[in-house]
């Protein structure tokens, strides 16, 4: 009997949102999803917080997913927003070199999705501090993705991101949506995914959630082009993900 395809995901240790969201989105999909953690407790531009995303612990977590014989490994996190896309590119290349498994990342998926959808301007929603939000906007601008409107919550501790209520996230999305052609919820520990379908119908524009983006790219990378209803346009239409790193 042939085994089901397996998606492996790297997740920050204090993240509590992306796993249940991914399991819910994968219901009915002929594949399984598996997670490996590495230590992350807070997000800021401070040196010790940036060092949480060093290559060594992330590769160790990836090697554990190799033990499960995953068919793709996804970095389900947004650190490239303030560290630069080269950090994700280096990580994914190292994962593939050391495990033989193709690897993708959330920020790579975002940039490819905006290209597929023909988007050049976005509204940005994050839970982060102002300095982190501004660093993200600068990174995205390098790849011709301009942030027209932005809302952030000024939070630092990763556990606090998961505690943000749905009505707060929805308010932020609606606020930036009034001034742009799409909204990006950029954090994999902020529970935006369950709101996407309803808000896209209400606002008439794409709402791209980080967890949804990562799962879309991972599914497409291993040839699982399912149409998944109830989680927004990206998963229902499921356009092909091109595993090519965007150039600056």
Image: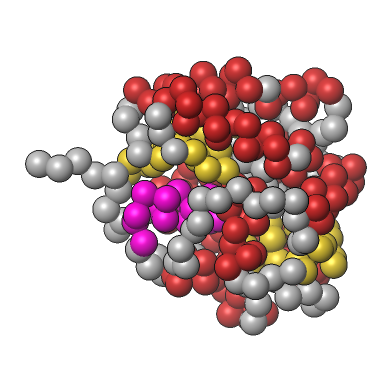
The residue shown at (55%, 55%) is 213
Whether residue 68 is visible, yes or no, is: yes
- Check residue 97 for magenta coloring: no
Q: Kindly indicate the quadrant of the structure image that contains residue 194.
A: bottom right
Q: Give the quarter of the figure containing the N terminus.
A: top left
Q: Measured from the top left, where is residue 113 in percent x and y?
A: 59, 62
Q: Is 51 rendered above or below residue 4?
A: above
Name the dominant secondary structure of the magenta segment: helix
**Which residue is rendered at x = 81% and y = 63% of the image?**
146
What is the magenta range? 210-225
Q: In which quarter of the image is residue 79?
A: top right
Residue 144 location in percent, x, y?
Answer: 77, 61
Which residue is found at the position 36% from the left and 61% from the top?
225
Q: Residue at coordinates 29% horizontally, 44% vertically from top-left?
A: 5
Q: Which color mode does the image show?
A: secondary structure
Left or right: 71, with 41 as reference point: left
Viewer-proximal residue among 160 and 41: 41
Question: Residue 88's x, y, as percent?
Answer: 64, 37
Residue 179 to residue 109: above or below:
below
Residue 159: give x, y in percent of width and height. Answer: 67, 35
Tag count in the figure?
0
Instruction: Say if residue 38 shows up in the picture.
Output: no
Residue sticking out furthest to the front: 247
Q: Quadrant of residue 85?
A: top right
Image vertical order of residue 7 relative to residue 10, above or below:
below
């Amino acid at each position: 009997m042939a085994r089901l395809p397996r998606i492996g995901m790297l997740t920050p240790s204090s993240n509590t949102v992306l796993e249940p969201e991914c399991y819910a989105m994968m219901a009915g999909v002929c594949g399984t999803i598996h997670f490996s953690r590495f230590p992350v407790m807070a997000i800021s531009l401070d040196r010790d917080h940036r060092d949480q995303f060093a290559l060594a612990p992330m590769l160790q977590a990836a090697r554990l997913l190799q033990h499960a014989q995953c068919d793709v490994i996804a970095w389900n996190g947004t650190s490239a927003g303030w560290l630069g896309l080269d950090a994700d590119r280096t990580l994914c290349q190292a994962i593939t070199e050391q495990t033989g498994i193709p690897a993708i990342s959330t920020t790579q998926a975002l940039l490819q999705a905006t290209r597929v959808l023909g988007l050049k301007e976005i509204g940005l929603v994050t839970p982060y501090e102002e300095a982190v939000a501004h660093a993200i906007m600068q990174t995205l601008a390098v790849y011709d993705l301009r942030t027209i409107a932005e809302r952030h919550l000024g939070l630092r501790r990763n556990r606090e991101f998961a505690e943000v209520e749905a009505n707060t996230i929805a308010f932020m999305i609606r606020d930036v949506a009034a001034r742009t052609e799409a909204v990006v919820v950029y954090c994999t520990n902020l529970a935006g995914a369950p709101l996407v379908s309803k808000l896209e119908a209400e606002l008439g524009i794409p709402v791209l959630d980080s967890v949804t983006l990562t799962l879309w790219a991972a599914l497409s990378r291993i040839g699982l082009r399912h149409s998944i209803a109830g989680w927004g346009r990206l998963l229902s239409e499921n356009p092909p993900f091109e595993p090519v790193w965007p150039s600056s």
